[in-house]
Amino acid sequence: MAGYFRTAVLLAGMTALFMGVGFLLGGTGGMMIAFVVALGMNAFSYWNSDKMVLRMYNARQVDAQSAPELYGMVQQLAANAGLPMPKVYIIDDAQPNAFATGRNPQNAAVAATTGILRTLSREELAGVMAHELAHVKHHDTLIMTITATIAGAVSMLANFALFFGGNRNNPLGLIGVILLMILAPMAAAIVQMAISRSREYEADRMGAEICGQPLWLASALAKIAGGVQHIPSEAAERNKATAHMFIINPLHGERMDGLFTTHPATENRIARLQEMAREMARETGGGSFSGGHRPSPPAPSGGASGSWGGAPHTGGGRAGSGTVPRSGSRPRGSSGGSSGGSSGPWS
Protein backbone atom coordinates (compact mmCIF):
# COMPACT_ATOMS: atom_id res chain seq x y z
CA MET A 1 0.00 0.00 0.00
CA ALA A 2 2.90 2.36 0.71
CA GLY A 3 3.96 2.19 -2.94
CA TYR A 4 0.49 3.17 -4.13
CA PHE A 5 0.32 6.01 -1.59
CA ARG A 6 3.65 7.41 -2.84
CA THR A 7 2.38 7.16 -6.39
CA ALA A 8 -0.81 9.06 -5.49
CA VAL A 9 1.20 11.82 -3.79
CA LEU A 10 3.52 12.04 -6.78
CA LEU A 11 0.66 12.26 -9.25
CA ALA A 12 -1.03 14.95 -7.16
CA GLY A 13 2.17 16.99 -6.94
CA MET A 14 2.98 16.73 -10.62
CA THR A 15 -0.62 17.54 -11.55
CA ALA A 16 -0.55 20.63 -9.33
CA LEU A 17 2.71 21.72 -10.96
CA PHE A 18 1.23 21.16 -14.41
CA MET A 19 -1.84 23.26 -13.46
CA GLY A 20 0.39 26.01 -12.08
CA VAL A 21 2.26 26.24 -15.35
CA GLY A 22 -1.06 26.33 -17.19
CA PHE A 23 -2.27 29.18 -14.98
CA LEU A 24 0.82 31.27 -15.67
CA LEU A 25 0.41 30.65 -19.37
CA GLY A 26 -3.32 31.29 -19.69
CA GLY A 27 -4.86 32.30 -16.39
CA THR A 28 -7.84 30.35 -15.01
CA GLY A 29 -8.75 28.96 -18.42
CA GLY A 30 -5.21 27.76 -18.97
CA MET A 31 -5.20 26.12 -15.55
CA MET A 32 -8.40 24.19 -16.30
CA ILE A 33 -7.08 23.06 -19.66
CA ALA A 34 -3.86 21.94 -17.98
CA PHE A 35 -5.90 20.04 -15.36
CA VAL A 36 -7.79 18.11 -18.04
CA VAL A 37 -4.55 17.41 -19.91
CA ALA A 38 -2.87 16.29 -16.69
CA LEU A 39 -5.67 13.84 -15.91
CA GLY A 40 -5.35 12.37 -19.37
CA MET A 41 -1.57 12.19 -19.05
CA ASN A 42 -1.77 10.49 -15.66
CA ALA A 43 -4.09 7.82 -17.04
CA PHE A 44 -1.99 7.38 -20.15
CA SER A 45 1.25 7.28 -18.16
CA TYR A 46 -0.08 4.62 -15.81
CA TRP A 47 -0.76 2.24 -18.68
CA ASN A 48 1.87 3.25 -21.24
CA SER A 49 4.80 5.10 -19.65
CA ASP A 50 6.93 1.95 -19.51
CA LYS A 51 6.43 1.31 -23.22
CA MET A 52 7.28 4.94 -23.97
CA VAL A 53 10.55 4.78 -22.04
CA LEU A 54 11.59 1.51 -23.68
CA ARG A 55 10.78 3.01 -27.08
CA MET A 56 12.89 6.09 -26.29
CA TYR A 57 15.91 3.81 -25.99
CA ASN A 58 15.00 1.49 -28.88
CA ALA A 59 15.07 -1.43 -26.46
CA ARG A 60 14.52 -4.86 -27.99
CA GLN A 61 12.90 -7.67 -26.05
CA VAL A 62 14.81 -10.94 -25.69
CA ASP A 63 13.84 -14.38 -24.45
CA ALA A 64 15.34 -17.72 -23.48
CA GLN A 65 16.25 -18.44 -27.10
CA SER A 66 17.80 -15.10 -28.10
CA ALA A 67 19.65 -14.37 -24.81
CA PRO A 68 19.64 -17.59 -22.74
CA GLU A 69 22.22 -16.57 -20.13
CA LEU A 70 20.75 -13.15 -19.34
CA TYR A 71 17.17 -14.44 -19.43
CA GLY A 72 18.01 -17.40 -17.22
CA MET A 73 19.79 -15.18 -14.73
CA VAL A 74 16.84 -12.79 -14.43
CA GLN A 75 14.48 -15.76 -14.14
CA GLN A 76 16.43 -17.22 -11.20
CA LEU A 77 16.80 -13.87 -9.44
CA ALA A 78 13.08 -13.15 -9.86
CA ALA A 79 12.35 -16.51 -8.23
CA ASN A 80 14.71 -15.61 -5.37
CA ALA A 81 12.82 -12.35 -4.90
CA GLY A 82 9.38 -13.99 -5.10
CA LEU A 83 8.49 -12.00 -8.22
CA PRO A 84 6.82 -12.93 -11.50
CA MET A 85 9.23 -13.20 -14.42
CA PRO A 86 9.65 -9.70 -15.90
CA LYS A 87 10.20 -8.99 -19.57
CA VAL A 88 13.87 -8.65 -20.47
CA TYR A 89 15.20 -6.02 -22.88
CA ILE A 90 18.58 -5.11 -24.34
CA ILE A 91 19.50 -1.56 -25.39
CA ASP A 92 22.14 -1.05 -28.06
CA ASP A 93 24.22 1.51 -26.18
CA ALA A 94 27.95 1.39 -25.45
CA GLN A 95 27.50 3.02 -22.03
CA PRO A 96 27.22 0.40 -19.25
CA ASN A 97 23.88 0.93 -17.50
CA ALA A 98 20.52 -0.65 -16.70
CA PHE A 99 17.03 0.23 -15.47
CA ALA A 100 13.66 -1.33 -14.62
CA THR A 101 10.21 -0.15 -15.61
CA GLY A 102 6.55 -1.22 -15.45
CA ARG A 103 3.44 -0.28 -13.50
CA ASN A 104 3.56 -3.33 -11.18
CA PRO A 105 5.49 -6.60 -10.71
CA GLN A 106 3.08 -8.41 -13.04
CA ASN A 107 3.89 -5.96 -15.86
CA ALA A 108 7.54 -5.23 -15.17
CA ALA A 109 10.57 -5.14 -17.45
CA VAL A 110 14.31 -4.91 -16.89
CA ALA A 111 16.64 -3.43 -19.50
CA ALA A 112 20.41 -3.71 -19.82
CA THR A 113 22.68 -1.97 -22.31
CA THR A 114 25.08 -3.87 -24.54
CA GLY A 115 27.79 -1.87 -22.79
CA ILE A 116 27.01 -3.33 -19.40
CA LEU A 117 26.85 -6.85 -20.82
CA ARG A 118 30.33 -6.43 -22.29
CA THR A 119 31.81 -4.76 -19.21
CA LEU A 120 30.62 -6.77 -16.21
CA SER A 121 31.39 -10.28 -15.03
CA ARG A 122 28.51 -12.72 -14.54
CA GLU A 123 28.42 -12.09 -10.80
CA GLU A 124 28.50 -8.33 -11.16
CA LEU A 125 25.67 -8.41 -13.69
CA ALA A 126 23.66 -10.55 -11.29
CA GLY A 127 24.09 -7.84 -8.64
CA VAL A 128 22.81 -5.20 -11.07
CA MET A 129 19.79 -7.26 -12.16
CA ALA A 130 18.99 -7.99 -8.51
CA HIS A 131 19.07 -4.24 -7.82
CA GLU A 132 16.59 -3.62 -10.65
CA LEU A 133 14.31 -6.39 -9.39
CA ALA A 134 14.39 -4.72 -5.97
CA HIS A 135 12.89 -1.62 -7.62
CA VAL A 136 10.18 -3.84 -9.10
CA LYS A 137 9.44 -5.43 -5.72
CA HIS A 138 9.10 -2.00 -4.08
CA HIS A 139 6.83 -0.70 -6.88
CA ASP A 140 9.44 1.98 -7.56
CA THR A 141 9.16 1.35 -11.28
CA LEU A 142 5.68 2.86 -11.52
CA ILE A 143 6.82 6.00 -9.73
CA MET A 144 9.97 6.29 -11.85
CA THR A 145 8.30 5.89 -15.21
CA ILE A 146 5.37 8.21 -14.47
CA THR A 147 7.75 10.83 -13.09
CA ALA A 148 9.89 10.64 -16.20
CA THR A 149 6.87 11.09 -18.46
CA ILE A 150 5.27 14.00 -16.61
CA ALA A 151 8.55 15.77 -15.82
CA GLY A 152 9.33 15.79 -19.51
CA ALA A 153 5.88 17.17 -20.26
CA VAL A 154 6.25 19.94 -17.64
CA SER A 155 9.54 21.01 -19.20
CA MET A 156 7.97 21.00 -22.64
CA LEU A 157 4.99 23.05 -21.44
CA ALA A 158 7.32 25.55 -19.83
CA ASN A 159 9.03 26.04 -23.19
CA PHE A 160 5.65 27.11 -24.62
CA ALA A 161 5.93 30.20 -22.43
CA LEU A 162 8.28 31.66 -24.99
CA PHE A 163 5.42 31.75 -27.50
CA PHE A 164 2.31 32.06 -25.35
CA GLY A 165 3.61 33.67 -22.18
CA GLY A 166 2.55 37.15 -23.31
CA ASN A 167 -1.13 36.28 -22.88
CA ARG A 168 -2.94 39.03 -21.04
CA ASN A 169 -4.14 36.47 -18.45
CA ASN A 170 -0.58 35.98 -17.26
CA PRO A 171 -0.53 37.98 -14.01
CA LEU A 172 3.26 38.30 -13.91
CA GLY A 173 3.90 39.52 -17.43
CA LEU A 174 7.33 39.12 -18.97
CA ILE A 175 8.96 38.44 -15.61
CA GLY A 176 6.52 35.58 -15.09
CA VAL A 177 7.41 34.13 -18.48
CA ILE A 178 11.12 34.13 -17.65
CA LEU A 179 10.55 32.66 -14.20
CA LEU A 180 8.28 30.02 -15.65
CA MET A 181 10.83 28.86 -18.21
CA ILE A 182 13.49 28.56 -15.49
CA LEU A 183 11.60 27.35 -12.43
CA ALA A 184 9.06 24.89 -13.86
CA PRO A 185 11.65 22.39 -15.14
CA MET A 186 13.61 22.88 -11.93
CA ALA A 187 10.53 22.10 -9.83
CA ALA A 188 9.91 18.94 -11.86
CA ALA A 189 13.53 17.93 -11.32
CA ILE A 190 13.24 18.49 -7.57
CA VAL A 191 10.23 16.16 -7.44
CA GLN A 192 12.30 13.53 -9.26
CA MET A 193 15.21 13.94 -6.86
CA ALA A 194 12.97 13.78 -3.79
CA ILE A 195 11.86 10.26 -4.66
CA SER A 196 15.08 8.95 -6.19
CA ARG A 197 18.02 9.09 -3.85
CA SER A 198 16.78 7.20 -0.77
CA ARG A 199 15.17 4.69 -3.12
CA GLU A 200 18.56 3.79 -4.62
CA TYR A 201 20.04 2.95 -1.23
CA GLU A 202 17.10 0.68 -0.43
CA ALA A 203 17.30 -1.05 -3.82
CA ASP A 204 21.03 -1.64 -3.26
CA ARG A 205 20.27 -3.28 0.07
CA MET A 206 17.47 -5.49 -1.17
CA GLY A 207 19.33 -6.30 -4.38
CA ALA A 208 22.27 -7.55 -2.34
CA GLU A 209 19.89 -9.76 -0.38
CA ILE A 210 18.30 -11.14 -3.56
CA CYS A 211 21.62 -12.20 -5.11
CA GLY A 212 23.21 -13.06 -1.75
CA GLN A 213 26.44 -11.10 -2.36
CA PRO A 214 26.67 -7.36 -1.59
CA LEU A 215 30.17 -7.15 -3.09
CA TRP A 216 28.94 -8.27 -6.51
CA LEU A 217 26.85 -5.10 -6.74
CA ALA A 218 29.58 -2.95 -5.16
CA SER A 219 32.07 -4.08 -7.79
CA ALA A 220 29.50 -3.51 -10.55
CA LEU A 221 28.76 0.05 -9.38
CA ALA A 222 32.46 0.95 -9.53
CA LYS A 223 32.77 -0.33 -13.09
CA ILE A 224 29.52 1.28 -14.27
CA ALA A 225 30.46 4.65 -12.78
CA GLY A 226 33.80 4.52 -14.57
CA GLY A 227 32.14 3.59 -17.83
CA VAL A 228 29.58 6.40 -17.57
CA GLN A 229 32.38 8.94 -17.09
CA HIS A 230 34.07 7.91 -20.34
CA ILE A 231 31.19 6.77 -22.55
CA PRO A 232 28.31 9.19 -23.21
CA SER A 233 24.82 7.94 -23.96
CA GLU A 234 23.22 9.94 -26.75
CA ALA A 235 19.77 8.50 -26.00
CA ALA A 236 20.00 9.51 -22.33
CA GLU A 237 21.18 13.00 -23.22
CA ARG A 238 18.12 13.36 -25.49
CA ASN A 239 15.79 12.13 -22.72
CA LYS A 240 17.16 13.75 -19.57
CA ALA A 241 13.89 13.26 -17.67
CA THR A 242 14.58 9.51 -17.57
CA ALA A 243 18.02 9.81 -15.93
CA HIS A 244 16.72 8.91 -12.46
CA MET A 245 15.58 5.50 -13.72
CA PHE A 246 19.10 4.15 -14.32
CA ILE A 247 21.26 2.40 -11.73
CA ILE A 248 23.90 5.13 -12.29
CA ASN A 249 23.04 8.61 -13.61
CA PRO A 250 23.78 8.33 -17.36
CA LEU A 251 24.23 12.07 -17.91
CA HIS A 252 27.63 13.72 -18.00
CA GLY A 253 28.40 16.66 -15.75
CA GLU A 254 26.28 15.44 -12.80
CA ARG A 255 28.73 13.73 -10.49
CA MET A 256 28.40 15.47 -7.12
CA ASP A 257 26.24 14.13 -4.32
CA GLY A 258 24.61 17.53 -3.92
CA LEU A 259 21.12 18.98 -3.90
CA PHE A 260 20.44 18.59 -7.61
CA THR A 261 21.56 15.00 -8.24
CA THR A 262 19.12 12.13 -8.78
CA HIS A 263 21.47 9.47 -7.36
CA PRO A 264 23.56 9.20 -4.20
CA ALA A 265 27.33 9.32 -4.66
CA THR A 266 28.56 5.98 -5.95
CA GLU A 267 31.28 5.93 -3.29
CA ASN A 268 28.62 6.14 -0.57
CA ARG A 269 26.63 3.30 -2.10
CA ILE A 270 29.73 1.10 -2.36
CA ALA A 271 30.67 1.83 1.25
CA ARG A 272 27.20 0.77 2.45
CA LEU A 273 27.39 -2.45 0.46
CA GLN A 274 30.85 -3.22 1.86
CA GLU A 275 29.54 -2.69 5.38
CA MET A 276 26.59 -4.95 4.60
CA ALA A 277 29.03 -7.64 3.42
CA ARG A 278 30.99 -7.38 6.67
CA GLU A 279 27.78 -7.68 8.69
CA MET A 280 26.78 -10.78 6.74
CA ALA A 281 30.22 -12.30 7.37
CA ARG A 282 29.92 -11.64 11.11
CA GLU A 283 26.44 -13.14 11.24
CA THR A 284 27.65 -16.33 9.56
CA GLY A 285 30.66 -16.55 11.85
CA GLY A 286 33.15 -16.06 9.02
CA GLY A 287 35.77 -13.47 8.42
CA SER A 288 35.81 -13.73 4.69
CA PHE A 289 34.74 -10.22 3.82
CA SER A 290 37.86 -8.21 4.54
CA GLY A 291 37.37 -4.71 5.83
CA GLY A 292 40.06 -3.63 3.41
CA HIS A 293 38.25 -4.96 0.35
CA ARG A 294 37.72 -2.62 -2.56
CA PRO A 295 35.67 -3.30 -5.65
CA SER A 296 37.55 -3.96 -8.86
CA PRO A 297 38.44 -0.73 -10.71
CA PRO A 298 36.32 0.51 -13.59
CA ALA A 299 36.73 -1.49 -16.78
CA PRO A 300 38.45 0.16 -19.75
CA SER A 301 36.07 1.94 -22.09
CA GLY A 302 36.63 -0.78 -24.68
CA GLY A 303 35.09 -3.32 -22.34
CA ALA A 304 38.11 -5.65 -22.42
CA SER A 305 36.93 -7.49 -19.33
CA GLY A 306 33.44 -7.94 -20.67
CA SER A 307 31.11 -10.75 -21.65
CA TRP A 308 31.32 -11.88 -18.03
CA GLY A 309 34.94 -12.73 -18.75
CA GLY A 310 36.18 -12.29 -15.19
CA ALA A 311 34.85 -12.76 -11.68
CA PRO A 312 34.54 -9.76 -9.39
CA HIS A 313 36.39 -9.53 -6.12
CA THR A 314 34.43 -11.29 -3.41
CA GLY A 315 36.95 -11.20 -0.61
CA GLY A 316 37.69 -14.88 -0.97
CA GLY A 317 34.67 -16.09 0.96
CA ARG A 318 31.21 -17.46 0.26
CA ALA A 319 32.10 -17.66 -3.39
CA GLY A 320 29.89 -20.63 -3.94
CA SER A 321 26.97 -19.40 -1.86
CA GLY A 322 25.50 -16.97 -4.37
CA THR A 323 22.06 -17.50 -5.77
CA VAL A 324 22.83 -16.88 -9.42
CA PRO A 325 22.23 -19.76 -11.85
CA ARG A 326 25.43 -21.33 -13.06
CA SER A 327 24.56 -23.22 -16.19
CA GLY A 328 28.13 -22.87 -17.46
CA SER A 329 31.42 -21.19 -16.68
CA ARG A 330 30.93 -18.66 -19.48
CA PRO A 331 28.10 -17.50 -21.66
CA ARG A 332 28.02 -18.84 -25.13
CA GLY A 333 29.93 -16.71 -27.59
CA SER A 334 32.67 -15.66 -25.16
CA SER A 335 36.14 -17.05 -25.00
CA GLY A 336 39.09 -16.46 -22.76
CA GLY A 337 38.97 -13.46 -20.48
CA SER A 338 38.05 -10.88 -23.06
CA SER A 339 34.90 -10.14 -24.93
CA GLY A 340 36.76 -8.75 -27.88
CA GLY A 341 34.14 -5.99 -27.97
CA SER A 342 31.35 -8.32 -29.08
CA SER A 343 28.16 -8.79 -27.17
CA GLY A 344 28.39 -12.58 -27.19
CA PRO A 345 25.04 -14.22 -26.50
CA TRP A 346 23.29 -10.83 -26.34
CA SER A 347 23.44 -10.08 -30.07
Image (tube, rainbow, N blue to C red):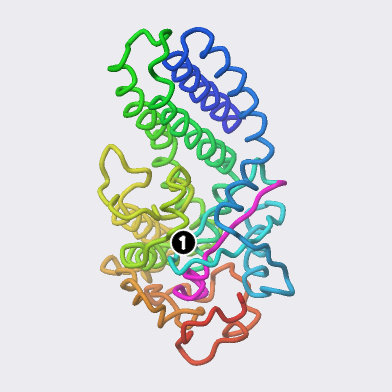
Q: Is 296 located above or below residue 54 in the figure?
A: below
Quarter of the image containing the C terminus? bottom right
Residue 37 rendering spot, x and y as whole percentages: 60, 23
Q: In this view of the protein, which residue sits in the foreground, 171 or 68? A: 171
Residue 251 rendering spot, x and y as whole percentages: 36, 53
Residue 154 rendering spot, x and y as whole percentages: 47, 30
Q: Is 341 located above or below residue 240 in the figure?
A: below
Q: Quadrant of residue 281?
A: bottom left
What residue sits 52% from the left and 41% below the top?
Answer: 144
Q: Quadrant of residue 38?
A: top right
Q: Is 19 located above or below residue 342 in the figure?
A: above
344 lies left or right of 249: right
179 lies left or right of 341: left
Numbered range of the magenta stretch = 106-123
Q: Is residue 294 magenta?
A: no
- For label 1, the residue is 97
Q: Residue furthest right?
A: 65
Quarter of the image containing the N terminus? top right
Q: Amino acid at mark 1?
A: Asn
What residue sits 64% from the left and 53% below the top?
Answer: 109
Element under label 1? loop
Residue 42 rendering spot, x and y as whole percentages: 62, 28
Other-residue count near label 1 (Cα within 10 Å), few / some / many at <14 / 14–19 / ≥20: many
335 lies left or right of 286: right
